[in-house]
Image (tube, rainbow, N blue to C red):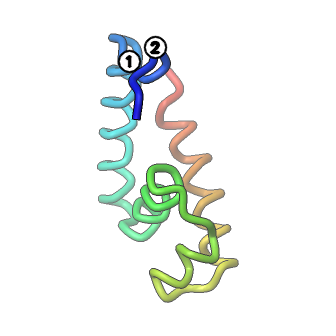
Amino acid sequence: MTLDESAVVDDRNVQDLLDLHRALEKLAALDPVEARIVEMRFFAGLTEVEIARELGISERWVREQWTHAKAWLRKELTP
């Protein structure tokens, strides 16, 4: 693995990551499964099928929760 300029974290990126972390903690308090879906999809790059299998829920439910979580996070992270 090589380190390139795109992997360097600047102050703005750090703040964005901290804001996202806080928002995910807030989401987890409201809906732990939805927060877990976000983590698995966004950070681990799992597909809806993989998430459904891992959590023992339907793909449709994963899709609905992912859509809701994205909207909730967008609202939460928009100043």
Total numbered labels: 2
View extreme (bottom): residue = 56
Q: Secondary structure at mark 2?
A: helix
Q: From the top left corner, tell me how far across and down residue 20 is, in percent.
A: 39, 36
* Badge 1 vs badge 2, beta-carbon distance below 8 Å: yes
Q: From the top left corner, tell me how far across and down residue 50 is, in percent.
A: 56, 75
How many residues crowd around disc 1 within 10 Å: few (fewer than 14), some, or many (20 or more)?
Answer: few
Q: Which mark is residue 28?
A: none
Placement of 33 over or under 42, stated as above or below? below
Residue at position x 36%, y 12% in the image: 10
Q: From the top left corner, tell me how far across and down residue 42 is, in percent.
A: 51, 50
* Image quarter of the N terminus: top left
Q: Quadrant of residue 65?
A: bottom right
Q: Is residue 43 left or right of residue 51?
A: left
Residue at position x 43%, y 23% in the image: 7
Q: Is residue 61 left or right of residue 13?
A: right
Placement of 39 over or under 10, stated as above or below? below
How many residues crowd around disc 2 within 10 Å: few (fewer than 14), some, or many (20 or more)?
Answer: few
Label 1 sits on residue: 8
Gap between marks 1 and 2 measured at Cα = 5 Å
Q: From the top left corner, tell me how far across and down residue 3 is, in percent.
A: 39, 23
Out of 22 and 9, give the one closest to the viewer.
9
Q: Amino acid at mark 1?
A: Val
Out of 76 and 57, give the one closest to the viewer.
57
Q: Amino acid at mark 2?
A: Glu
Q: Secondary structure at mark 1?
A: loop
Residue at position x 53%, y 73% in the image: 51
View extreme (front): residue = 1
Placement of 41 over or under 60, stated as above or below? above
Out of 34 and 8, give the one closest to the viewer.
8
Residue at position x 53%, y 56% in the image: 45
Label 2 sits on residue: 5
